[in-house]
Amino acid sequence: MKISLLLIGKTEEAHLQTGIKIYQTRLTRYMDFSITEIPELKNTKNLSEKEIKRKEAELILKKISDKDFVILLDEKGKDYSSVEFSKFLDKQNKPITFIVGGAYGFDETIYKRANGMISLSKMTFTHQMIRLIIVEQLYRAMTILNGEPYHHS
């Protein structure tokens, strides 16, 4: 299994960087896993939200291939329990790219390119925190699929 996490901007907070690194290291035991950060746009104060999303979309589209199964992390996405998420991952037979958008979400071109959307919660989290949450959930899913005790149901 090959999974990529594509992010707009860097993970800034040290405690989140540490947590992400811990789960990223653990995930390599189960899969080919990578994280790609697309630098945030600069000089955006004269740009509208729509223009920012369009420019971010151009950068995102350069980083994904036609073969990738693209899942957006989006508040309008499907809700999964951790067990349901593990079953979803288990059914995939293509490389999966999860994308965390910028502060304004995604441009319509990204919604059209996506194969699906997942919501990690009905609550709102910072884009920084979502990075740690998705990496932890990927690790949890792998331990569920492998019958390991990390996930207690």
Image (cartoon, rainbow, N blue to C red):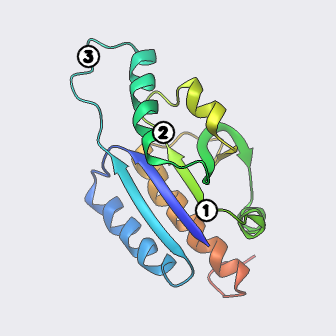
Amino acid beneath label 2 = Leu
Q: Which quadrant is the C terminus positioned in?
A: bottom right
SS type, badge 2: helix
Label located before the other in sequence (3 or 1): 3
Could you tell me if residue 52 is visible in this image? yes
Label located before the other in sequence (2 or 3): 3
SS type, badge 3: loop
The spot of residue 81 in percent (x, y) is: 74, 60
How far is disc 1 from disc 2 in space, using C-alphas?
16 Å
Q: Are the residues tagged 1 and 2 within 8 Å (C-beta)?
A: no
How many labels were placed on the picture? 3
How far is disc 2 from disc 3 in space, using C-alphas?
23 Å
The spot of residue 102 in percent (x, y) is: 42, 35
Q: Is residue 146 above or below residue 117?
A: below
Q: Which residue is mark 3?
A: 45
Q: Quadrant of residue 134?
A: bottom right
SS type, badge 1: loop
Q: Which residue is mark 2?
A: 61
Q: Specify whether 90 is left or right of 39.
A: right
Name the residue nearer the viewer: 66 or 12. 66
How far is disc 3 from disc 1 in space, using C-alphas?
36 Å
Residue at figure coordinates x 41%, y 78% from the top left: 25
Residue at figure coordinates x 67%, y 62% from the top left: 94
Q: Which residue is mark 1?
A: 95
Near mark 1 (Cα within 10 A), the count class, few <14, some 14-19 or many ≥20, is some
Q: Is residue 26 above or below residue 101?
A: below
Q: Are the residues tagged 2 and 3 within 8 Å (C-beta)?
A: no
Amino acid beneath label 1 = Pro
